[in-house]
Amino acid sequence: MNHPAPTPTADAAAAPSAVDLQKATAFALKVIGDVTACQIGTLNLVADRLGLFPALTQAGAVTAEEFADHASIHARYAREWLSAMACHGYVAFDDATKKFHLPPEHALALADPDSPLYLTSLFAMPTAYWANVDRLTDAFRHGGGVPQACFGEGFWCGFERFTRTAFRNNLAQDWIPALPEVHARLQAGGRVADVGCGNGQALIYLAQAYPNAVCVGFDNYEPAIAAANAHARAVGLPPERLRFEVCDVERGLPDSYDLITCFDVVHDMPRPRPALQSIRESLQPGGTYFVLEFNFSSDLQENIEHPMGIGAFGYSVSTNYCMTQALAAGGEGTGTCLGETRMREFAQAAGFTRCRRIDFPANPFNLFYELRA
């Protein structure tokens, strides 16, 4: 719905004389930058769908016309896309040769899907946010939220690709070996449950790394479980070693486990306190609950001053998805910015006696916790 601009009042018209116009102009330019980022987002999504960033890496330094031939796209669109990317700082341009290239440092984030810094997969996710904007507006007015089922396959594929890189590069190589007792149990044939397993990427890598372990993934979203079982079959892992089941963790897990994991899940849980209590009750004696969360604080000021400057990312993705889907399920809506303080509160309320934070310097984007009953 279009809304007419309000008519300024006399007081509002006089207000500019009381403000710092230099600061006002700087802020206006920031807003233009934000709008530009939204517009560049569609171009990044097209690039992801057509493989333009990998193509530019392969092509090296090229003119727009040379790139159009290399990437099999229309020359006029190649020039405009490359020009937009150059102005946005994604692509480098040499005015002397009129050639464009993708710097190798940028390629890690944009062109290499196996890189631990790969982020191009995120460009697929905001389409679901825009598709749900009417539902979100209604939730702002009346409460409730946007159900998980409204986000669609494109959103889940983008999220799966986003999380895959950390699982591929770090899960069995760094995270589990940092828990020596867990590492030994899995080598000897321990049982693992991944709660909120989504499409199953984490457990697939874990089952491949620990061939004696028995791995089970649980999620309350049926389409994710169907996809996870299909992925397990595709890589040749039999159900006696790896399987995925629909399960509401609040109602209990069907067995006991040496290791239970939640990767980027606790803040999404509609009711995390009873869910964590159920997880604690499902651990074998001496078992471990291993949690990955985003590196945010539960304190707003700390997120405003976040050393990586990603506080706004946390709250915006929370409003668009994490918080709203939990509220839609009748939950408390924890939100993406869970933080260490609230995580410890949840652990204590669930009956865990130990909550140890583990830092991995190569992964500053996440917080990790080892919980024991």
Image: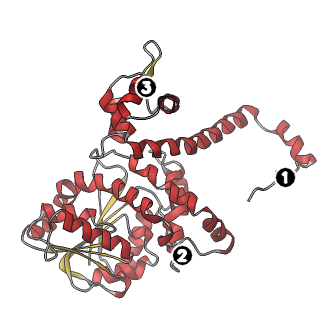
Above or below residue 269? Residue 12 is above
Compute the Cα span from label 2 to label 1: 33 Å
x, y (%) of residue 298? 49, 62
Closer to us: 208 or 315? 208
Rendered residue at 53%/30% (across/down) = 80
Q: Quadrant of residue 203?
A: bottom left
Compute the Cα span from label 3 to label 2: 44 Å
Q: Amino acid at mark 3?
A: Ala
Rendered residue at 33%/37% (across/down) = 54
Rendered residue at 46%/58% (across/down) = 297
Closer to us: 149 or 34? 149
- Label 1: which secondary element: loop
User: First in sequence: mark 3 or mark 1?
Assistant: 1
State the residue position of label 1. Answer: 6
User: First in sequence: mark 2 or mark 1?
Assistant: 1
Tell me if 342 is positioned left or right of 260 in this view: right
x, y (%) of residue 12? 87, 46
x, y (%) of residue 85? 48, 32
Q: Amino acid at mark 2?
A: Ala
User: Is label 2 in contact with label 1 (beta carbons under 8 Å)?
Assistant: no
State the residue position of label 3. Answer: 92
- Label 3: which secondary element: strand
x, y (%) of residue 25? 71, 34
Neighbour tally class for label 2: few under 14, some 14-19, many 20 plus, Cα within 10 Å: some
- Quadrant of the rendering where the N terminus is positioned: bottom right
Neighbour tally class for label 3: few under 14, some 14-19, many 20 plus, Cα within 10 Å: some
State the residue position of label 2. Answer: 328
